[in-house]
Image (cartoon, helix red, strand yellow):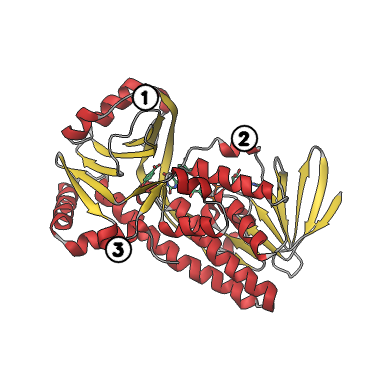
Amino acid sequence: MTQQTTQIVIIGAGPSGLALGAKLNKLGIDNIILEKQTKEYVLARIRAGILEQTTVDFLSDIDASDRLKEEGIPHHGVQLAYDNQLMQIGLGENTGGKVVTAYGQTEVTKDLCDIREKSGRSVIYQAEDVSLHDFDTDAPYVTYRTDGTNHQIYCQIIAGCDGFHGVSRASVPKAALNIFEKTYPFGWLGVLSDVPPVSAEVVYANTPRGFALCSMRSWSRSRYYIQCTPDDHIDNWSDDRFWDELRRRLPDALGEAMETGPSIEKSIAPIRSFISEPMRFGRLLLAGDAAHIVPPTGAKGLNLAFSDIFYLSEAVKAFFDKKDEAALDQYSQKALKRVWKAQRFSWYLTNLTHRFSDDPFDQRVKEAELDYIRHSVAGRQMIAENYVGMPF
Ligand code: FAS
Ligand code: PHB
C-alpha cells in the first residue's frame, strides 16, 4: 500500500473534476484527480454543446479558453418552432448583450486535459475501486488500486465530481440525502453527423410527432435530437429513418433545407430531473452530475458543473486560508440556489416543447404559452435571461 498526502482529492476527470483541478492549481491548493476510465474513454464522450457566458468566463479565468475563443460560435438567439413556424428569441437584445456559445463538451474536456498536463499535475486514470473514508471527520482519506497496487491518499477535502453513477454520492448514508427526482416518460435520440447545421441557432420544436432539437458543433458538424420512447433502442433507428423523422418534425422551411449524411455517433439518453441535497457531507463536497441532473432541454447540465466549481473553489479557498468550516456549508447553499433555478427552467422548457400527455388541455396550454411568448417582451426576456444563464 503506497501512501500520499494532498489537500484535496478530486474524484472524476470529467468537466467538473478537471475544472476544479485547474482552479485549485491557480489558487495554489494541492490536489490529485482520480478517474476510473482511460483518458481516451473520457475524451470520446459526446454530450453537451452550448456554453453560457459564465462558463466561457470561468474557462478564461483558468486559462482554458484559447481554442474556445478561436472555434466557439456565438449564438445571439434561440428558436422555438411550432405550428410549422419559427419564433426567434433574441438573447443579446433581451439580456443586455449576453450570448451563448456553441462549443462541444468534448472540446472543453480536451482543453481542460491539456492545461492539466501542462500544469505538471497528472490525472490518475484507470483508478479502480475508489473508496472514500472518514469524510465525517477532519482526517478523510481515499483508497484506490492501479495495476494491482493499493494506494491511500490522506487529504482535508474530498471533491465528488464523479457524475450521476459515481461512488461519492453513493458513499453518503441514504438517511443523510434529500432526493428530489422527476423521470420524464421519454428519451432523447441524439445523432452527430458531419453535415452543415440546418440553423445558425439552436431550434427547439414542439410538433404533433414529438420534440426535435437542432444544434451544431461547428459549421460543418451538426447535432440533432428527437424525442423517443424511454425504452427505445438505437438499433430501431437507421440513419434514413432518423433523418426522415427529424424532417417531419421541423417547419417546412428547415426540413427542406436540411442536409443529411452518415451518423458518426448515435445514442439514446434518459431524461430526468434530479437533485440531491445538501451538496456537503462533512469534508465531502459534491459537484456537477454527482449532485444533480437536469433535462438537457435547457442546455444547463454542463454549465451547472462550472457554477458548482466556481462556488466550491471559493469555499475551499476560505477553508484553507481561514480554517472557515462555515464556508463549506455556504458552498452547498449557494450552489443549490443556482441549481434549482436551472432545474426550474429546464423543467419549464421541457414541458413547453415536448408532447407526453394525452390530455388535449395540456397541448392547448402549451400553444397558448408559445403564442404569449411570441407577443410578449417579458415572456421572451424570461426565456433569454435563463437561457444565457443566471449570474454566479
Ligand atoms: P461527468 O459524468 O461528465 O464526469 C464524471 C467523471 O467521473 C467521468 O469521467 C467518470 O468516468 C468518472 N467516475 C465515475 N465514477 C467514478 C469512480 N468511482 N471513480 C473515479 N472516477 C469516476 N448537458 C448539457 O448541458 N447538454 C446536453 O446536451 C447534454 N447531453 C448529455 C447526454 C448524455 C448521454 C449525458 C450522460 C449527459 C448529458 N449532459 C448534457 C449532461 C452532461 O454534459 C453533464 O452535465 C456533464 O458531463 C457534467 O460533468 P461532470 O459533473 O464532470 O460529470
Ligand atoms: C447540444 O448541442 O448538444 C445541445 C444544445 C442545446 C440543448 C441540448 C443539447 O438544449
Residue drawn at x 61%, y 53% as measured from the top left? 17
- Give the structural element (helix, strand or loop) at label 1: loop
Q: Residues within 10 Å of mark 2 (few under 14, many from 20)?
A: few
On the image, the x and y values in percent for residue 315 come to 60, 70
Cα–Cα gap, marks 2 and 1: 27 Å
Q: How many marks?
A: 3
Q: Is 182 on the left-hand or right-hand side of 314?
A: left
On the image, the x and y values in percent for residue 180 come to 44, 59
Numbered circle sitting on residue 40: 2
Sequence-wise first label, 1 or 3: 3
Question: Mark 3 sits on what residue?
Answer: 95
Q: Nearer the viewer, mark 1 or mark 3?
A: 3
- Residue type, label 2: Glu
- Give the structural element (helix, strand or loop) at label 3: helix
Question: Mark 1 sits on what residue?
Answer: 237
Residue in front for this viewpoint, 288 or 56: 56
- Residue type, label 1: Trp
Q: Residues within 10 Å of mark 3 (few under 14, many from 20)?
A: some
Cα–Cα gap, marks 2 and 3: 39 Å
On the image, the x and y values in percent for residue 35 come to 66, 45
Residue drawn at x 70%, y 40% as measured from the top left? 126
Residue drawn at x 45%, y 67% as measured from the top left? 392
Residue drawn at x 37%, y 52% as measured from the top left? 100
Q: Residues within 10 Å of mark 1 (few under 14, many from 20)?
A: some
Q: Nearer the viewer, mark 2 or mark 3?
A: 3
